[in-house]
Image (tube, helix red, strand yellow):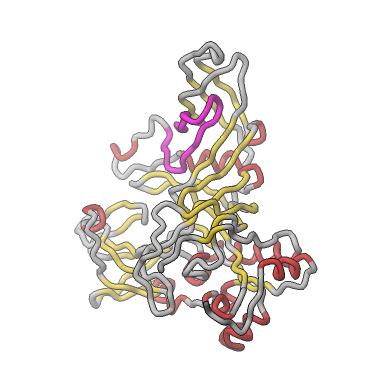
């Protein structure tokens, strides 16, 4: 067991938050603190580091209970604004997925499809307080005799609305290029021929799981900023892979950890849950997430001072290798280079662009910092940490 020069507990840090004495900095600010004072002194001075990310997160959605009708219905098929929701939960429960497209959309039959509306937009409309059209179909039972029901609803007409996202906040993601001779349309955006552009998708040094690369403070019960409200880590996310390639600093150099998140949709904001239409690909949902990292010791101080210079990802060809499932790295690149707007691959200068918003990630980290400083947000001690690489 490691011996640390600085050692704090969640209880001690939460007591300082209650008393208004906790020292909270953003992940950007922590870089300077550690550079000036070293990790041990930084651990003594700082109690919490806040992080943030705002990016399309396809594996997202909401459980909705729209209440019983008169006469009652067992709604086996459900649509919200013509977007199909999964009705196989209970009589008046459904799950609306962020990537479900509205019925009647031409999809990619007119290529590239524009995908004007889908599940992510329904979720945004709900949190914006807009009226949505609910349609239900059932097959009729003795206790639920109705076969069709239709009505207008808002989020606050619903009995329950729970955002539940099976996979959020991917810890690192690939950089996408297109080596073919034609433009392609992917979940990484439009990629022009012959590596004319490269797209990437995380907030780098601000991104939550980069600041706790081995998941020492993140797990079941961790309290987070989710969609503009307080939410929680519910479980490890789907595709969670702690055994990814890592650098000497412990930071993954490819896709690795993920989290499942949960929170009260009725408390959230359309500023931090935004429907997305991705040309030629489909629909998604931009999700704002921020995780506070408790500085329990100098190791956590060192982790939270990670810089874009020291975070790397792999470059993949999305025209052939990726769709074939034969990933072969074309090289790796730092987030400092990606955020500069230009990288060099095989001697060729390539323009870069993010799918995520660094500006909004910074805003989330600042908001979370303010919540904690006001005493409105206490740390949630995880009951079980995310599985880590042994």
Q: What residue is rendered at 48% in x and 58% in y?
A: 169
Picture coordinates of residue 121 (x, y %)? 50, 41
Specify whether residue 91 is painted magenta: yes
Residue in the foreground of this view, choosing between 28 and 128: 28
Q: Quadrant of residue 66?
A: top right
The image shows a total of numbered marks equal to 0
Residue in the foreground of this view, choosing between 199 and 23: 23
Query: Would you say residue 297 is visible in this rendering?
Result: yes
Picture coordinates of residue 349 (x, y %)? 30, 74
Q: Quadrant of residue 384?
A: bottom right
Q: Quadrant of residue 6?
A: bottom right
In this picture, residue 181 sits left or right of residue 126: left
| The residue positioned farthest toward the front in the image shown | 1
Q: What residue is rendered at 53% in x and 11% in y?
A: 142
| The residue positioned farthest toward the right in the image shown | 19
In this picture, residue 185 sits left or right of residue 214: left
Q: Which residues are magenta?
A: 80-102
Residue 341, above or below 36: above
Specify whether residue 112 is painted magenta: no
Q: Main secondary structure of the magenta part?
A: strand
Residue in the foreground of this view, choosing between 217 and 377: 217
């Amino acid at each position: 067991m490691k011996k640390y020069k600085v050692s704090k507990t969640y209880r001690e840090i939460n007591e300082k938050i209650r008393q208004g004495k906790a020292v909270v900095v953003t992940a950007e600010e922590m870089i300077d603190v550690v550079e000036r004072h070293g990790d041990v002194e930084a651990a003594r001075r700082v109690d919490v580091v806040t992080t943030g990310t705002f990016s399309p997160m396809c594996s997202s959605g909401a459980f909705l209970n729209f209440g019983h009708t008169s006469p009652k219905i067992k709604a086996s098929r459900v649509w919200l604004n013509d977007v199909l929701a999964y009705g196989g939960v209970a009589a008046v429960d459904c799950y609306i997925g962020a990537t479900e497209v509205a019925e009647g959309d031409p999809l990619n039959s007119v290529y590239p499809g524009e995908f004007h509306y889908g599940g992510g937009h329904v979720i945004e409309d709900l949190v914006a307080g807009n009226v949505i059209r609910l349609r239900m179909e059932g097959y009729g039972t003795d206790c639920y005799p109705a076969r069709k029901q239709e009505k207008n609803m808002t989020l606050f007409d619903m009995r329950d609305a729970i955002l539940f996202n099976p996979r959020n906040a991917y810890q690192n993601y690939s950089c996408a290029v297109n080596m073919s001779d034609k433009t392609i349309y992917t979940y990484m955006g439009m990629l022009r021929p012959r590596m004319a552009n490269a797209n990437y998708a995380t907030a780098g040094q601000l991104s939550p799981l980069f600041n706790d690369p081995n998941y020492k403070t993140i797990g079941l019960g961790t309290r987070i900023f989710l969609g503009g409200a307080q939410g929680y880590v519910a479980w490890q996310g789907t595709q969670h892979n702690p055994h990814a390639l890592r650098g000497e600093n412990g930071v993954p150099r490819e896709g690795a950890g993920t989290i499942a998140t949960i929170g009260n949709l009725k408390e959230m904001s359309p500023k931090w849950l935004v429907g997305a239409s991705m040309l030629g690909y489909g629909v998604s949902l931009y999700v704002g997430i921020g995780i506070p990292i408790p500085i329990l010791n100098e190791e956590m101080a060192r982790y939270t001072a990670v810089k874009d210079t020291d975070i790397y990802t792999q470059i993949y060809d999305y025209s052939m290798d990726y769709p074939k499932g034969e990933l072969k790295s074309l090289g790796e690149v730092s987030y400092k280079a990606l955020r500069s707007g230009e990288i060099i691959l095989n001697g060729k200068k390539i323009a870069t662009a993010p799918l995520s918003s660094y500006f909004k990630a910074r805003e989330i980290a600042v908001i979370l910092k303010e919540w904690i400083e006001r005493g409105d947000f206490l740390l949630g001690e995880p009951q079980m940490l995310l599985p880590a690489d042994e």
